[in-house]
Image (spheres, coloured by chain):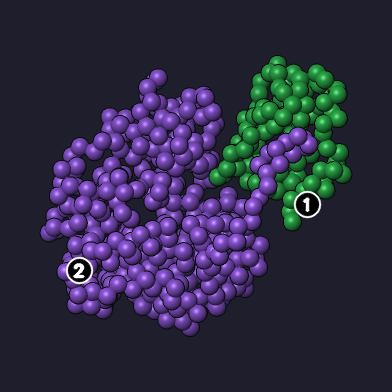
Chain colours: A green, B purple
Amino acid sequence: MATAGVSEYAVEALNRDIVFVELPAVGTVVEQGKPFGVIEAVKAVYDLFAPVSGRVIEVNPALANDPGVVGRLPWTDGWMIRIEISDPQELDNLLTPMQYAEQIASEKH
Amino acid sequence: MPLDSCLPDTTLIVVKRFCIKMNETPLTRWHQEHGARMTDFHGWLMPLQYTSITDEHLAVRRAAGLFDLCHMGRICLRGPDAVAFAHWMTTADVKAMAEGQVDYGFLCNPQGGIVDDITVYRNTNEVMLVVNGANRLKVMDWLTDHCDRYSVEIEDASGRLAMIAIQGPQAVAILQEETRFPLSAIRYYHFAPAEVAGVPMLVSRTGYTGEDGFELYLDAGACEAVWEKLMTPDKKIGDLVAVGLGARDTLRLEASMPLYGNELNDETTPFEAGLGKFVRMDKEDFMGRSALVQKYNAPARRLCCLVMSEKCIPRSGYKVYAGETAIGEVTSGTFSPTLLQGIAMAYVGPPYAKEGTVLAVEIRGRKCAARVVRRPFYSRKRMQSI
């Protein structure tokens, strides 16, 4: 099972001004790299991309009433969906935390 | 920008760094030094936000905010025909205006379309037009192309004359600390010369936020010092917050004030935009009048204010529906930080613009219910009376 959300870097880029999150219903099948939902700041809309393929087995119920929690605690309480991973090999496509940190650092400059 | 950039096969977006020289205001360095996220606004390097759009927005509604508006165009008309020229070119009744008066209005083309929406300042020896930053050069061309019959000097004073605004319920009290001039004597849509923070300036009781406050016109060289003085934190009264263009847009939208390029353009008439009361039809002839007389009673579409009935945020370009029929399009939309709802302005067929009409906005393929409400979305008077 995978838990998907957005990173500290992402919410920082949106200045934590998150006012709306649109997520799929439980049972929806998502596909790696494809949009599964939408995150909106006051003046911006962005797609959310699925890190792995699989069936959505849980959606964070807290976000409907308090989407701002994504901006405050993206790694913990601000999680979005849990996915039943259909192909564990897809995990090889993901960056490690170290690689991700390096990518962010290189994009900043 | 893909938010979840954990995928190596995500398309790598190469950001090209174009070396175009951006216009900077006398305050650009201040904004950068104070952590503003900067943005290119029609060629101007401007602060989008310092902290967050929501925080800055609410600071203006609850206390006061300070805005850098140097990107706006300040155009001064001087000479024997300055008043007559402004009277002909704009929808304002400039001849009837008293010195020290401001009027909102339009520069219209012969078809009645809006070249720009402007404020007109009638001063002792000149008329000043404050025009949109994005339209400054277009308006300068427009004025110079039509001044043949007039003895008038047209000066683009945007460089020498800075423009900042202080807006919010505490704006008067905060600004009063910096001047002996009795600011409460300046009525809404009037201005006066006054010395503020030791600097002579024009103090105008106008704004673009729906709040009380002032727009200030002063020597560009003195602008940063005045700004710094106003932002000094050890004030006795109030908290002043620097506000970027992001919150400026959400504030004006809550006040249902139009933005050129969104609600207004060269093909739109003031009547379609619901701004007919700013066209002084009873004054003598002016540019665009004959076309506007014909379009007065039968605008092809009308601007309306929509509040979303469910949790979703309308955005510019989204289609508006009555049942299954597309009847219009959103021109500006946002999440309203004051009302905590999605709000939008949209052009719809005239029958659908009536208050209370239930419509829908198509958001990512889903039709979300919306209701036409009376403009503005936010009024400080209405809020006080609740």
Up/down of B285 relative to A89, above or below: below
User: How far is mark 1 from mark 2, CA to CA?
Assistant: 57 Å
Q: Quadrant of residue B194?
A: bottom left
On screen, B361 above or below B226? above
**Location of residue B172 in the rendering, given as x and y in whole percent from the top left corner:** 45, 67
Give the residue furthest to the top. Answer: A27
Q: Which is more toward the observer, A38 or B97?
A: A38
Q: State the residue at coordinates (60%, 36%).
A: A20
Is residue B91 in view from this perspective?
yes
Image point (27%, 75%), residue name: B153
Position above or below: B217 against A103: below
Disc 1 target residue: A106
Quadrant in the picture for the N terminus of chain A: top right
Residue where numbered disc 2 is placed: B148
Q: Please, what is the three-letter code of the amino acid marked with disc 2?
A: Asp
Q: Position of residue B340 (x, y in %)?
A: 53, 40
